[in-house]
Amino acid sequence: MSGPPAGKLPLTELAEMKRRGEKIVMVTAYDAPGARFAEDAGVDLILVGDTAAMVVLGHEGTTVPVTMDEMLFLTKTVARAAYRPIVVGDMPFGSYQVSDEDAVRNAIRFVKEARAEAVKLEGAGPSVSRARAIVGAGIPVMGHVGLTPQSATMLGGFKTQGKTSEAARKLVTEALELEAAGCFAVVLEAVPAPVGAEITRRLTVPTIGIGAGADCDGQVLVYHDLLGLEERIAPRFVRRYAQLGSEAREAIAAYAADVRSGKFPSAAESYADPTRPAEVVAQLYG
Ligand code: KIV
């Protein structure tokens, strides 16, 4: 791959941040305005998450249906507006499960067509070999263990992972395998805080937690959760920093009431003076 565009946070800086004990900030975004807000807020990474299936595309309770073409479309819009943050395209279910070759081919589409700087994939097991193959093709990979929504059915639902010592040990092993495969960071989702801390201590690459405790090297939240745009579900690990959903609803209701009562648009919001309609018509039609 060619070098990053000017002004882009160098990927290698993330490991340096871990070394310096500086927290890494990642947020998801799915369009250019969201990317601009994240950029202005100074985040380090933007994940174009496959949570798009639920928070943008209207699929209920699953990330599985989102397609490569949909993810590429969303990633393109984000990449156009994100200058400093590293843009990570989330590989959707079905885009890397079949073979290493398929995984590399689809990862290439993320960087070549959608202009992502990196990709993320879920799980360990076969995903370790997929990650190694994609890194081998020169594309940075972010791993993701713990609650991996693409395999939520296998995991018994959207549940905390690594709660027994055996399950916790397995998570540590998986994270170490992903690091050994060349992943530049690993997302830890919905795991007990001590497990998040232990994995963070053992890895040299940064961990990015979501419901994995305060000791992770960085944190990620879903844009719609953080801003209160998704109001129906609130996992324990979500902190809402705004209530944009209720603000949006109130604003649209106020607009509708003004249209119905004739208060919108006003004269100032119109192009011609409505008190002199005859003159206006004359101006327009001679
Ligand atoms: O798809 C996504 O948004 C994610 C984050 C929750 C880490 O994978």
Image (tube, rainbow, N blue to C red):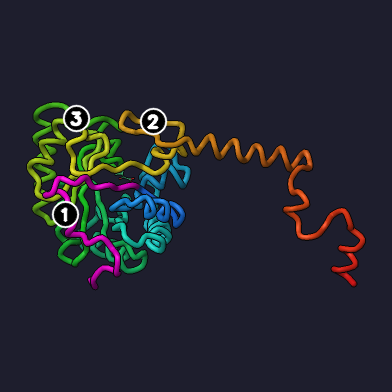
Residue 209 x, y percent position in the rendering? 23, 40
Asked if the magenta segment contains residue 16, the reply would be: yes
Query: Where's residue 47, x and y in %?
Result: 32, 51
Task: Please give the label number shown on residue 32.
Answer: none
What's the amino acid at mark 2?
Ala
Left or right, residue 67 beside residue 255: left
CA distance separating discs 3 and 1: 22 Å
Residue 234: mark in rendering: 2
Residue 161 at what x, y percent from top left?
21, 32
Quickly name the residue at label 1: 183
**Residue 133 in the image: x percent, y percent?**
16, 61
Q: Residues within 10 Å of mark 1 (few under 14, many from 20)?
A: many
Q: Amino acid at mark 3?
A: Pro
Amino acid at circle 1: Cys
Question: For residue 131, what is the image quadrant?
Answer: bottom left
Q: Is residue 101 above or below residue 225?
A: below
Cα–Cα gap, marks 3 and 2: 18 Å
In the image, taking residue 282 as reference, residue 126 lies left or right, namely left
Q: Secondary structure at mark 1?
A: loop
Q: Which residues are magenta?
A: 1-27
